[in-house]
Structures are given as C-alpha cells and as structure tokens.
Amino acid sequence: MATTLHMNQEPRKKQIAILGSTGSIGTQALQVIAAHADRFEARILTANNRWELLAEQARTFHPAAVVIANETHYTALRDALADLPIAVYAGADALCQVVESAEVEMVLTAMVGFAGLPPTIAAIKAGKPIALANKETMVVAGELINGLCRQHQVPILPVDSEHSAIFQSIMGEVSSIEKIILTASGGPFRTFTHRLLETVTPAMALKHPNWDMGAKITIDSATMMNKGFEVIEAKWLFGVEADRIQVVVHPQSVVHSAVQFADGAVKAQLGVPDMRVPIQLAFSYPERLHSDFDRLDWYTMHSLTFERPDTERFRCLALAYEALRQGGNMPCIVNAANEIVNRAFLEGRCSFLAMPDIIAQTMQRATFIQQPTYEDYLETDQEARRMAAEGLTAK
Ligand code: NAD
Ligand code: MG
C-alpha cells in the first residue's frame, strides 16, 4: 500500500552517518546537510582526534551518537556533551557498531586510509548504501567489497570527483563503457624536472593548485599515487579493466573525467572544482538539488589543456598500475607502504623520490596472496607497513 503524506507531516529526512566528519570531506558534507536541512540529517558523526570540533559539530547538528576513534579523548568528549541527549562512544569497534543502527540510511565514508575498511564492511553487511570517499577501501579490497555489495544489494555512490564524473557520464546509458578518461590535475610538481623533485619539501607538496584537501591525499596527489589509486577505484566501481582506463593530465581540473562509448562518443562532466557537488549528488541521487556553489564562467575559462602523464617522474602512478596488473593483495601492499611513506614524507623522514623506492621494495618483499580473504588483508596491511618502515630506516 502506498503511504500518503499528510499536509502537516514533514517528509522524512535521509539519516546520514558521516565517518570522519571533522576532515575536509566530512566538513563539506556537513555544509551540504546544513544547506538542505529539509532533506538530510546527520545521524552519526565520528572523528579520530579532533574531539573539540566533533563536539562543536554535535552541538550544531544534534546527531543521535558520536564516536571518537582515539579512546584517549573519550572523557573530554563525553564531558563536553554531557548536557545533550547524544550517545558518546569511543574506539575503532564503535565505528562499526554505530553504522549498523537501524535508523542510518546512508554512510559517508570520509575517513582516511585502511582504517576505513572495517566500518565500510560493517555498513554494507547492515545493508546501508555507501557514499564512498574513502578510496583506500576500494584500492585494498575492491573485489571483496563488490562481492559484499552484491550479496547485500547495497549501492555505492562515488564521492571522488572523477568517479562521480564517470558515474554522471553513464547515468541513463544502457551500453557498456569502451574507455574511461580519468583526468588528473598533475599536482603541484607537474612541470618539475627529476632534479627539482629531489628538493621538494612537505610545505611545497601541501600546496595543491586546485583542491583544498586533507594532508594525506594532498601528498598522494603530488606523487600521483592518488591517480593510481583512482585507476584501481575506477576498475572496481565500473568494472573496466586497467588497459581501458586512460589517465590524462588536465591542469585546470574543469573536466572532472569522461567516458567513451562504442560509437566513439565521449561524455564528460565539467564544473568548478568543488567537492560539495559530488557529495551532494551522492546524498540526493537520483535527484539533483539546487546549490549556491560557483558556476563555470565560459567567457573567462580561456583554455582547457590535456597531456600525457609522465610515469618516470611520477613513478607511483606506474606502481599502482603494476599492482592492479598483479592483482590479489598487491594493491593492499602498495596502499600500506604508501601510508607509511606518505606520513614519513610529511614528517620530514623521507624524501619525495624515496617514496616510490620504498613502495617498490615492499611490493617485492611482502607475501603475495592471489585470492586474499578479509583476514589476509588485515595481515598484509600489517606486514607491508612493517616492511615499509624498515625500508625507511635503511634509507
Ligand atoms: P582528512 O584528513 O581531512 O579527514 C579525515 C577524517 O577521518 C577526519 O575526520 C579524521 O578524524 C578521520 N580519521 C582519520 N583517521 C582515522 C582513523 N584511523 N579512525 C577513525 N577516523 C579517522 O581527509 P579528507 O581529505 O577529508 O579525505 C577523506 C577520504 O576521502 C580519503 O580517503 C580521501 O582519499 C578521500 N577523498 C578526499 C577528497 C578531498 O577533497 N579531500 C577528494 C576525493 C577523495
Ligand atoms: Mg579524485
């Protein structure tokens, strides 16, 4: 029987859990929720360390529960919210439990790194649609995630701007994809020679030309590992093999990616670089909602340029393709090693060009598993982290 909406009854608001609400994606997602308070509600908010910001967000958005993953901040957070009817939890396991709650209707995975894998799996097993920002989940365990999504009939809505663009390019299509054109800004060092790359500092790498993002992904963009991860993410999200995913450097970041079909037609999605657009679409799909974000100005946008990526200067991109070719747990090995060198570079313990060296060494040393289980991924992650850390001290 169809349910009727009475005049005095508000339409139900989509109840969204945000894993990583204090980060770059998380805070932009809250802006989207605030702008469409009639449509969306933040049901769960979580963070790793920034409990003060989490408490402030909770005061504004009134979620049913908050989780602070780092348990040492539990008491501070609980005391800060003592006067509000908000459940406060701590620890990594709590992240998995809160996403399972019956009221949650969508989970935005905006955590960074491998840590996003367990709660994403918990959410899928509980039947919750995923708005996927945490690309590391698909890099590490795309095949496993796809199998679970099929089993539990759970959709994944991409938030990564390129994957949202691909998704938008195939909206309404019934034919298969001939080729994906995955655009890349090229990062802050696009024009640097190999010699110049030897001298780059974390501060230089943290200045991305077009996007304001969290530190980890900004460094990954500078090495182009981010683009390599996005190739792996695209393979699993759209079922397209790596040889039909072409990375094209497009420094203006206006064409967010494109799809070519069997007749040669190419459809792309364009726009001002603003992550709130793909976040909002993931929340509202299949509808598009109004936004006040900037619009493209076709008279001032003088040129859009495209070039071939240089995988010799940006070896991380080649390593990611290689990991995809080898399959099994190799992308998981690359991800773990990358998390270690990324952090080390940020902290001044690893040079820019040593990053791909250590990742390549770890790929050779870590135990290869062709058909990994979930437990294998957990072990691989630990082993590869340990080996990459050894690689750092050997440098
Ligand atoms: P960020 O560092 O700004 O924020 C990360 C969030 O996750 C924070 O709220 C932090 O508290 C939480 N977090 C980090 N480690 C955690 C852990 N171990 N346990 C629990 N919570 C943890 O990162 P970001 O830039 O917002 O990126 C988030 C994810 O989205 C990443 O996977 C990134 O690749 C992806 N992504 C980001 C952008 C962007 O524009 N920022 C674009 C595309 C994809
Ligand atoms: Mg992206």
Image (cartoon, helix red, strand yellow):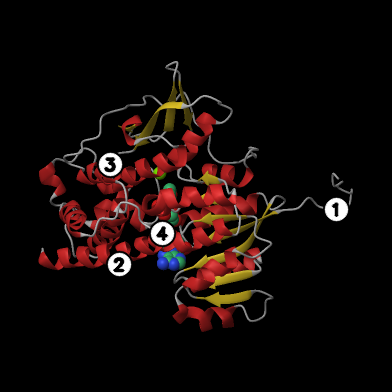
> For the residues marked 2 and 4, what is the alpha-carbon distance in whole angstroms?
17 Å
Numbered disc in front, either 3 or 1: 3
Residue 36 screen position, x and y as percent: 67, 49
Kind of residue sitting beneath label 1 = Gln
Numbered disc in front, either 4 or 3: 3
Disc 1 residue lies near ligand 1 with CB under 8 A: no
Disc 3 marks which residue? 325
State whether residue 170 is above or below residue 71. above
Q: Say which element carries label 4.
A: loop
Mark 3 or 2, nearer chain start:
3
Disc 2 marks which residue? 382
Q: Say which element carries label 2.
A: helix
> For the residues marked 2 and 1, what is the alpha-carbon distance in whole angstroms?
51 Å
Disc 1 marks which residue? 9
> For the residues marked 3 and 2, what is the alpha-carbon distance in whole angstroms?
22 Å
Kind of residue sitting beneath label 2 = Gln
**Are the residues at dot 2 and dot 4 in contact (C-beta closer than 8 Å)?**
no
**Ligand 1 shown in quarter:** bottom left
Disc 4 marks which residue? 112
Residue closest to the far top: 263
Mark 2 or 4, nearer chain start:
4
Residue 17 screen position, x and y as percent: 59, 60
Kind of residue sitting beneath label 3 = Arg
Numbered disc in front, either 2 or 4: 2
Mark 4 or 3, nearer chain start:
4
